[in-house]
Image (spheres, rainbow, N blue to C red):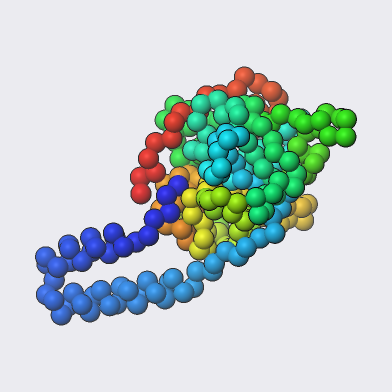
């Protein structure tokens, strides 16, 4: 996910338009477009600093890496050892990645958990299908109070729901890239872009890929999406996508049953 600005886009518009539009008309056209852009920009909410939540944390590529690369969340499973993130956050077998749930101010209130395996949809492994940009990671248990303990016993876990739908209100908590960054959170309404669930909120830069889209239901909060999918989550920081989850349910079932793990391909470009 590369959340880029739009200055390059406007430069291209100026260059192309200048070749075919008289100067006066061009100036009027650009002023109108900029006015529309400013109006649109003003209606998009901004994420706020979050106190964090036990089920959501920063995902590091190794124990020695000071800067996290993505966000992940603990999801309910029979073994109690499962995380969910974006597939483009994972490369190889994912062993040795580190998850820090509830991280805030560089602290790890619920410990640091080591990833042991990755499970992905076949269409991601073979061709990096953006519809299947979801990964499930197992983590090793820890000895706490003299007892072998799974992460779900420490943090709790989100249930996985069916895929996100137009009009639903979701809360997305994630970790912007950096060192000792605090999490951010935003509640926004979903719309669809070429089949990909979409929400708009400022602040979702690199590092927030994999952030769960949490929907409140009568039966408790459920995850209905993750930042990923189209353009690996988005090309600008205020618009984020999710892959539809149905393409990844098979990977979830394999992860919960302890089946043979997958090897993730090195992520390709995001196409922005």
Residue 137 location, quadrant: top right
Q: Work out whether residue 149 or residue 10 is closer to the camera in this orientation and state it.
A: 149
> Is 247 positioned to the left or the right of 54 in the image?
left
> Is 30 positioned to the left or the right of 153 in the image?
left
Q: Is residue 48 above or below residue 104?
A: below
Residue 178: give x, y in percent of width and height.
Answer: 53, 51
> Is 168 positioned to the left or the right of 228 in the image?
right
Q: Is residue 265 visible?
A: yes
Q: Residue at x 52, y 34 (%)?
A: 90
Q: Residue furthest right?
A: 146
Q: Is residue 269 above or below residue 194?
A: above
Q: Residue at x 65, y 46 (%)?
A: 57
Residue 236 location, quadrant: bottom left
Residue 180: give x, y in percent of width and height.
Answer: 60, 51
Q: Residue at x 42, y 47 (%)?
A: 231
Residue 260: give x, y in percent of width and height.
Answer: 62, 19
Q: Is residue 136 visible?
A: no
Residue 64: give x, y in percent of width and height.
Answer: 58, 35
Q: Residue at x 76, y 30 (%)?
A: 141
> Is 203 positioned to the left or the right of 77 in the image?
left
């Amino acid at each position: 996910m590369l959340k880029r600005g739009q200055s390059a886009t406007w430069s291209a518009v100026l260059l192309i338009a200048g070749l075919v539009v008289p100067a006066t008309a061009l100036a009027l056209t650009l002023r109108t477009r900029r006015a529309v852009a400013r109006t649109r920009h003003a209606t998009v909410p901004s994420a706020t600093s979050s106190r964090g939540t036990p089920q959501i944390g920063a995902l590091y590529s190794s124990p020695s890496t000071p800067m996290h690369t993505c966000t992940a969340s603990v999801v309910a499973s029979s073994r109690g050892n499962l995380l969910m993130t974006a597939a483009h956050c994972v490369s190889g077998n994912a062993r040795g990645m580190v998850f820090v749930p509830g991280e805030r101010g560089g602290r790890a209130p619920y410990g640091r958990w080591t990833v042991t395996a990755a499970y992905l949809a076949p269409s991601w492994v073979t061709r990096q299908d953006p519809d299947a940009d979801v990964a499930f990671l197992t983590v090793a248990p820890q000895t706490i109070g003299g007892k072998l303990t799974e992460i779900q016993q420490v943090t709790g876990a989100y249930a996985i729901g069916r895929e996100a739908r137009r009009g639903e209100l979701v809360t997305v908590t994630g970790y912007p890239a950096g060192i000792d960054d605090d999490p951010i959170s935003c509640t926004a309404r979903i719309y669809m872009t070429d089949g990909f669930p979409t929400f708009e909120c400022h602040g979702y830069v690199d590092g927030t890929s994999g952030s769960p889209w949490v929907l409140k239901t009568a039966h408790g909060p459920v995850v209905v999406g993750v930042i990923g999918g189209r353009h690996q989550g988005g090309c600008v920081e205020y618009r984020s996508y999710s892959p539809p989850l149905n393409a990844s349910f098979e990977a979830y079932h394999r992860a919960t049953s302890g089946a043979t793990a997958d090897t993730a391909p090195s992520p390709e470009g995001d196409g922005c």
